[in-house]
Amino acid sequence: MNYWQEAINLLVGGNSDVWAIIILSLQVSGLALVVSSIIGVPLGSLIGLHTFPGRQLVIALVYTGMGFPPVVIGLAVFLLLSRSGPLGFLGWLFTPSAMVLAQVILALPLVIGFTMAAVLAVDPALRIQIRALGASPTQTTLAILWEARVGVLVALIAGFGGIISEVGAVMLVGGNIQGSTRVLTTAIVLETRKGAFDVAIALALVLLGITFVINLAMLQLQGTLLKAKQ
């Protein structure tokens, strides 16, 4: 029996260890995406639709954050949450909470940046028209976000894709503890080093499958929305 067949058997057979890793990965990255969206979409809209002192500096920082090395984020979060760090009293280090925090910091610039780009791409005439109809600033922002909804969805998907496939930060702050903080990426690294290629392949197939399904759903949704505009 080759590694690929063994990997399929692990997934189909419902191996408890493998599925625990899959579920934890989805929980951690899903929660991180929700938090990043709650913070990032409003901030991206604010930056894209309003001018204020230091706006160019903020945009530069956002773009810098979009390409920031994950392992550096992991180190920063590790130092924050360590026993001698300013947030050490939380006791989050080597727990899923630390992993969520690290992934939120990683995803936030992506969500902000793509949301900002999406609202900036909306025709400025629409904004003028909405205001002329007596809409409040909040109503105007919501209307523009609706018009830029495809771009906002891209922002969310980019954020999720960036964090679920990341390994450096979550390994630093989570510790890759079996049954507690082991997720898809860190488990793949560990199992490969152990020579357990069947497990590594099974987890890699799941990671690829998640990425493929998300992007496929995005493309289908984008096509539906574009048809609705025509």
Image (cartoon, rainbow, N blue to C red):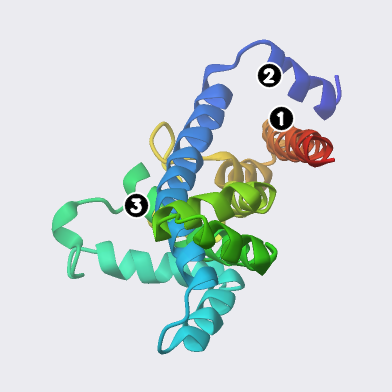
Q: Which residue is mark 3?
A: 98
> Which type of secondary structure does the marked residue at label 3 adopt?
helix
Label ID, residue 56: none
**Can the viewer see residue 144 in this picture?**
yes
Q: CA distance from mark 2 to mark 3?
A: 29 Å
The number of numbered discs placed on residues in the rendered structure image is 3
Q: Which residue is mark 2?
A: 10
Residue 46, given in percent of the width and then of the height, sits at: 45, 67
**Can the viewer see residue 95 in this picture?**
no
Residue 7, given in percent of the width and then of the height, sits at: 75, 25
Q: Which residue is mark 1?
A: 202
Query: Which one is closest to the eye, mark 2 or mark 3?
Result: 3
Does residue 117 sit above or below 202 in this rendering? below
Residue 172, given in percent of the width and then of the height, sits at: 44, 59
Q: CA distance from mark 1 to mark 3?
A: 26 Å
Residue 214, given in percent of the width and then of the height, sits at: 70, 37
Does residue 67 sit above or below 8 in this rendering? below
> Which type of secondary structure does the marked residue at label 1 adopt?
helix
Q: Are marks 2 and 3 in contact (CB under 8 Å)?
A: no
Would residue 228 be found to the left or right of residue 79 on screen? right
For disc 2, the neighbor class at 10 Å (few under 14, some 14 to 19, many from 20) is many
Q: Going from the N terminus, do you reach mark 1 or mark 3 first? A: 3
